[in-house]
Amino acid sequence: MLTILSTQEFSTVGKPKPVSSASVSFAIHSIAVLLLLSATYWRAEVLPERFTKMMLIAPAPPAPPPPPAPLVKALKVPATRTARIFSPVLVAPATIPQHAATLVEAIEAAPEIEGGVPGGVPGGVPGGVLGGVLGSVGTFLPAPPPPPPPQVVAAPIKPLEAQPARIAVDSEIQAAKLLVMIQPLYPVMAKQARIQGAVRMTAIIDRNGKITEIQILEGNPLLVEAARNAVEKWRYRPTYLHGEAVEVVTNITVKFKLQG
C-alpha cells in the first residue's frame, strides 16, 4: 500500500538540527592550537630568537667595607714624683721597716762561731770572712784559694840535623885545594906504541885531605896504572862544612900526551 505524506510533514522529519556558532568557533581554535604546538615541537627554529636563547647575568659584587676608624694614640702622661726633701737632722722612724726586721732575725738565727780568720779586722764579728762587709749576712765560708800560677811550657828543642859524613865536590873546585901534585911517569910501552889519552877516576878524600880510595872510570890499560900510582900521592886541604871537616868525593882526570 502506498502512503503519500504531505509536504509539511516531510520537511519537518528529514531536516537536521541547527549547530550553534559557539561550538564551531571552539573547535576551530582547538585545531589551530594543536597544529601550532605540533609545529613548534618538531621545529624549534621557527620560534622567535627571544624564545630560544637565554642569558645569565651575574649579580653585582658587594660593596667594599668602610675604612677602619683612625686609631687614636693614647698620650702618655708623665708620672708625677713627689720631691724628697733631705734633712741633715736624723729622725727616728715611726715604724721599723719590714726588711730591717728580717735582717735582725737572720742575724739572731745565725750560729755563733768563736774566733776569727787570719788577717781579720780587730773588733770584727766572730766567724766573719776575710774582706767581708761589716753588718752583712754571709755564708761564713773561707775565702777561695788563689789560682795556681800559669805553667810555663818550654818550647821543644829542635834536634840538630846530622852532618853528612861525606859530600860530593866538583872536580874544578876540589883542584883548587890541591897542595901536593905528583906528575905520573909515562909508561915505556905506551911511548913505544904511541898511545896517549886521558884516565878518568873517582877518588875519596878523607878529612885530612889524603886520598883513601880510587875507582877507574875510563882510560887505556897501559896508562891506568901509572895514573893511579901518581894520584895516590896527591894531598888536598881539608874540606869543612858548618865548621867541621868532612870527607869528599870528587872526579880526577889525568892526561897523557907525547912530546913532538
Image (cartoon, rainbow, N blue to C red):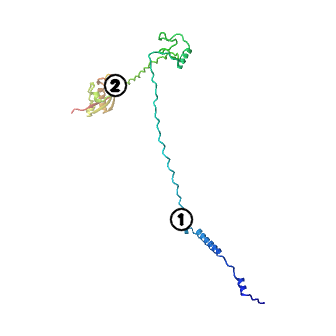
Q: Is residue 227 above or below residue 60?
A: above
The answer to whether marks 2 and 1 mark residues whose Cβ atoms lie closer than 8 Å is no
Foreground pick, 220 / 150: 150
Residue 8 in the image: state x and y as whole percent.
71, 86
10 Å neighbourhood of mark 1: few (<14), some, or many (≥20)? few
Residue 190 visible? The answer is yes
Residue depth check, mark 2 versus mark 1: number of the one nearer the observer: 1
- Can you give x and y, in whole percent of width and height, for residue 141 in the image? 52, 16
**Other residues around mark 2 within 10 Å, as few (<14) / some (14–19) / many (≥20):** many
Which amino acid is tagged 2? Glu
In the picture, which quadrant includes the C terminus? top left
Q: CA distance from mark 2 to mark 1?
A: 127 Å
The kind of secondary structure element at disc 2 is strand
Q: Quarter-wise, where is residue 151 in the image?
A: top left
Amino acid at the residue labelled 1: Arg
Q: Secondary structure at mark 1?
A: helix
Residue 33: x %, y % from top left? 61, 70
Q: Which residue is mark 1?
A: 50
Does any portion of residue 212 appear in the rendered image? no
Q: Residue furthest front?
A: 8
- Report the front residue among 47 and 171: 47
Q: Nearer the viewer, residue 129 or 147?
A: 129
Q: Residue at x 71, y 83 (%)?
A: 12
Marker disc for residue 98: none
Label count reads 2
Residue that protrudes farthest toward the left in the picture: 260
**Outermost residue toward the right in this view:** 1
Vertical relation: 14 (above or below) 161: below
First along the sequence among labels 2 and 1? 1
Q: Which residue is mark 2?
A: 247
Question: Viewed as shown, does residue 75 lie left or right of 253?
Answer: right
| Residue sitting nearer the eye, 37 or 167 | 37
